[in-house]
Amino acid sequence: MTQAQRRVGLVLARASKVLGEEPYYHEFVEGLERVLTPAGVSVLVKVVIDRQAETETYERWAERGRVDGIVLVDLAPDDDRVALVNRLGLPAVVIGAPSTASGLPTVWTDDAGFAREAIRFLAERGHVAIGHVSGPLTFVHTQLRREGAQAEAEARGVRLLHAEGDYSYESGRAAIGEILGAGPTAIVCDNDVMALAVLDALREKGLAVPADISVVAWDDSAQCQLAVPALSAMSHDVGRIGELAAGAMLDAMGGAPPAVYQAPAAHIVVRDSTR
């Protein structure tokens, strides 16, 4: 490929409906393109149904010379995609914990630390029973968030109530059924879409937010701001994370040694959903 034709590939093994509801990856790709497009590099995004289809996509792209690099997301422990891209000879950047990257360049967000901050924020407001609606526990970043939340809860004498979702609206509604009976006075959700579902489910059950239960979303968005009540959220600069990933990708394609790129710190944005 000539420089003007260079491409970076991003494969998302998630349900199309979930990706359509969730703004995170739209903002992430916008960040990628802000840096890559001026450098003459386009972004090729493909949505697939599972990890096997993702693997086949990388193999096909490598065989046909479709991409010059890969951005890897949603890594699992000992993720075999790291070895795969190395075997295929494709420069790659991992979005996640350095422990998952096996020497690849990494854009790292302190998921455990920010989860501790969310629990600390609620504990300092008097909450002693907090629900945590996580994303899929197969993902390392989900495991780190749960570990961080649990560590902070134990340090503060808070009871943490767990439910696992898949980032979809439906899974947020289902999670309420799992944890509401245990009497939480606050709920933290691992994305904005599940938090919106929790708001709707609580309203249908006749519970007021925040008078009866406070709700915090992970990933601030316009949806959080427009919700009724507006959602307090752990805010990340997702566009900046995309820009960092793009810079790391250009470095990798240029033969630079692997490095860890620290994402900007997240912070709580306080709105009407918390008391």
Image: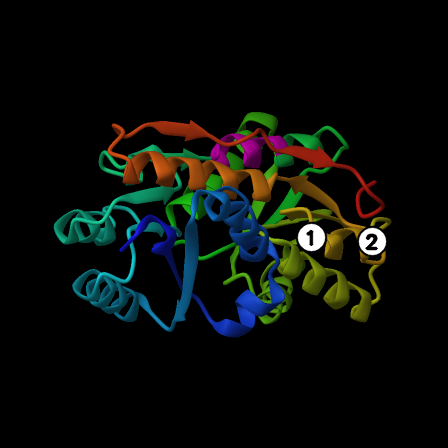
Q: Horizontal and vertical percent for residue 264?
A: 56, 30
Identify the residue position indicated by label 2 in the image: 209
* Amino acid found under the numbered disc labelled 1: Gly
Identify the residue position indicated by label 1 in the image: 183
Main secondary structure found in the magenta portion: helix
Give 140 or 239, whichever is nearer the viewer. Answer: 239
- Residue found 60% across the figure and 53% down from its top: 191
Residue reaching furthest to the left? 87
Does residue 147 appear anywhere in the picture? no
Quarter occupied by the C terminus: top right
Q: Is residue 83 left or right of 52 when viewed as pictured? A: left
Comes first in the chain, label 1 or label 2: 1
Q: Is residue 142 above or below residue 101?
A: below
Q: Quadrant of residue 49?
A: bottom left
Write the start and end of the magenta stretch as one range: 109-117
Q: Is residue 86 left or right of 219 when viewed as pictured? A: left
Q: Quadrant of residue 12?
A: bottom left
Give 83 or 128, whichever is nearer the viewer. Answer: 83
Residue 110 among magenta residues: yes
* Amino acid found under the numbered disc labelled 2: Val
Give 46 or 43, whichever is nearer the viewer. Answer: 43
Does residue 99 appear anywhere in the picture? yes
